[in-house]
Image: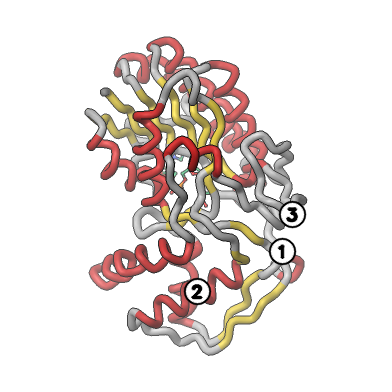
Amino acid sequence: MKILLLGSRGQVGQELLLTLPTLGTVTAWSRDELDLAQLDTIETKVIAQQPDVIVNAAAYTAVDKAEQEPELAHTINGEAPGKLAQAAAACGATLIHISTDYVFDGQQNQPYRPDSPTQPLGVYGQSKLAGELAVKAACDRHVILRTAWVYGAKGQGNFVKTMLRLGAERDTLKVVYDQVGTPTWSYDIAQAIAQLIPHLTPETFGTYHFTNSGAVSWYDFAIAIFEEAAALGYPLALKTVLPITTDQYPLPAQRPAYSVMGSEKLDALLNQTPPHWRVSLRKMLPELLSAQSQS
Ligand SMILES: NC(=O)c1ccc[n+]([C@@H]2O[C@H](COP(=O)([O-])OP(=O)(O)OC[C@H]3O[C@@H](n4cnc5c(N)ncnc54)[C@H](OP(=O)(O)O)[C@@H]3O)[C@@H](O)[C@H]2O)c1
């Protein structure tokens, strides 16, 4: 099987780079090999590879910056996936495209299903929803995998890395408690994608949710990060973590207050349930702390 991986330098992409080779020959592209903002180049370059499966882990992920760069976000997240889907259709490949919980407005009080109504609150979510629609329109052979609150040891910044840095520098932190979701380890996403690929058939194409299990506020997630890091001997200056509301910490992009997603559809296909978010956090931290101590 020939697999083309896009976004190989990202949090999820780096994990996929380690996981996908068990399934076939992987060609891994970062922005250097294919810039998704260059829409005209996408189809030719992808078709030339004649992949069986394309995994798109590349995206414009700067949620707040997207409010100032809506056109670029829409090009990369909204239009480029459509070009990838056209290329997939042209060479009979299946496209696995990663999307986000931010396609939802957060007004539900029970987990979102893959067919729950979408209503993004900001430019990033709108651009990702446009990408989903473009994929669906251009290629039947697709899987859209929505995930959420991604963190990991690899790649650029994420909430866990930010909390650890601030926790080492400050004695007091304020973290919002009125946004609830499910932190998800990039390694677990890569594992789920690798497990999904052998199940790809016309009956299984469609939209899925994958997150770790459980639900937590950013505040309680921060507390868990500090507890787990302290147990591993991480040097915290932190004495107090204060819960605050979203209104007390205004950001350019509005976030859904509740973005828990049910993964039952994928669980049934893979015959397993995802690890609990705290179990995955505990497993991830030694890798992150070890990487930090070596840098
Ligand atoms: N992070 C989250 O909390 C979160 C939550 C829900 C869903 N998701 C989705 O999960 C997927 C993976 O996210 P992630 O957390 O791994 O993101 P990430 O760490 O920000 O990685 C995204 C990758 O996309 C690449 N990229 C950006 N613009 C590009 C362009 N014009 N051309 C080619 N590549 C480009 C980046 O390349 P450079 O390294 O060169 O910048 C980066 O390596 C994305 O679809 C994202 O929307 C993420």
Find residue 185 and report its horizontal and vertical position in percent.
43, 55
Question: In screen coordinates, is 117 left or right of 94?
Answer: right
- Residue 254 visible, this angle: no
Q: Earlier in the sequence, mark 2 or mark 1?
A: 2
Q: Are marks 2 and 1 in contact (CB under 8 Å)?
A: no
**In-front residue for pair 286/279:** 279
Amino acid type, label 2: Ala
Q: Which residue is mark 3?
A: 109
The residue under the point 42% across, 76% down is: 228
Question: In screen coordinates, is 32 left or right of 79?
Answer: left
The residue under the point 37% across, 53% down is: 155
The residue under the point 29% across, 34% down is: 28
Amino acid type, label 3: Asn
Q: Earlier in the sequence, mark 3 or mark 1?
A: 3
In this rendering, is residue 133 above or below 89? below
Q: Which residue is mark 1?
A: 250
In this rendering, is residue 184 above or below 162? above
In this view, the mark in front (3 or 2): 3
Mark 2 vs mark 1, CA separation in Å: 23 Å
**In-front residue for pair 265/283:** 265
Q: How packed is label 2: few (under 14 Cα within 10 Å), some, or many (20 or more)?
A: some
Find residue 203 and report its horizontal and vertical position in percent.
50, 21
Question: In screen coordinates, is 197 left or right of 290?
Answer: right
Q: For mark 3, give the secondary structure.
A: loop
Amino acid type, label 1: Pro
Find residue 154 and report its horizontal and vertical position in percent.
35, 55
In this view, the mark in front (2 or 1): 2
Q: How packed is label 1: few (under 14 Cα within 10 Å), some, or many (20 or more)?
A: few
Q: Are marks 3 and 2 in contact (CB under 8 Å)?
A: no
**In-front residue for pair 284/274:** 274
Find residue 232 and report its horizontal and vertical position in percent.
33, 79
Q: Which residue is mark 2?
A: 224
